[in-house]
Each structure stands twice: as structure tokens, then as C-alpha cells.
Image (tube, helix red, strand yellow):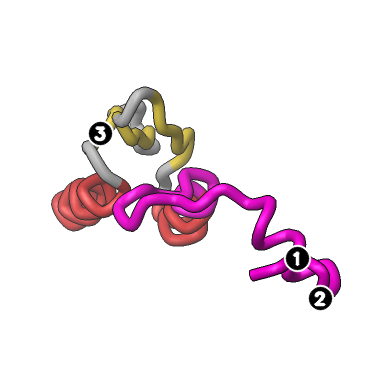
Amino acid sequence: MRGDRGDTAGFLMARQRRGVFDVDEDRALAELEDAWTSGGYHGFSVDHGTWSAIGSAGEVLTGATPDELGRKIRAHWQVMQ
């Protein structure tokens, strides 16, 4: 790609490539918030590979990936119903 075909090509050349297994943390956190805030979960974060959320009663749920955290939230939510 040469970068002389408008902003898109130049942007793509300047952007660093992510590995196939790298996670877009901001996007994943936004998706978790969208999915679970109305279910009583908040405080979504990721720190050094540990993903976390806080339940409405103060429980801290963690996972090694956004998917793992999502599964733990779902299981916790089902028990609380």
C-alpha cells in the first residue's frame, strides 16, 4: 500500500498492526458495559491482563480475557436471579 491515495491509505500505513490474538481493550470494555450495566454490573476494567467488573452488591468478578469475564458475569447473574 503506497499511502498516496487519500487519507485512508495513509492512515492504514501509519497504523501499527495488531496481532491476531490481541484485544482492542477499549472496544471490549465498551461492549461489556453495554451488555451488563443494566444487569447491575459496573466498574469494568482491565489491568495487566486481568479483566474485572463489580457487581451491584460489591462483588468483584475477574477473568483472563473479556470472554472469560463475560461468562463469569453471566453465571453470577443467573445465580442472582
Is 79 above or below relative to 45? below
Q: Amino acid at mark 1?
A: Gly
**Quadrant containing the N terminus in the rendered view:** bottom right
The residue singled out by tag 1 in the image is 3
**Relative depth, front residue between 17 and 75:** 17
Q: Residue at x 83, y 67 (%)?
A: 7
Is 45 above or below relative to 16? above
Q: Which residues are magenta?
A: 1-29
Q: Residue at x 36, y 48 (%)?
A: 22
Estimate the x, y position of residue 42 in percent, counting from the top left.
Answer: 47, 39
Q: Residue at x 34, y 31 (%)?
A: 57
Crowd tier of the residue under label 2, counting other residues whose Cα lies within 10 Å: few below 14, some 14–19, many 20 or above: few
- Look at the numbered disc 3 and give the secondary structure of its residue: strand
The residue singled out by tag 3 in the image is 62
**Relative depth, front residue between 50 and 56:** 50
Estimate the x, y position of residue 43 in percent, counting from the top left.
Answer: 48, 33
**Disc ID at residue 5:** 2
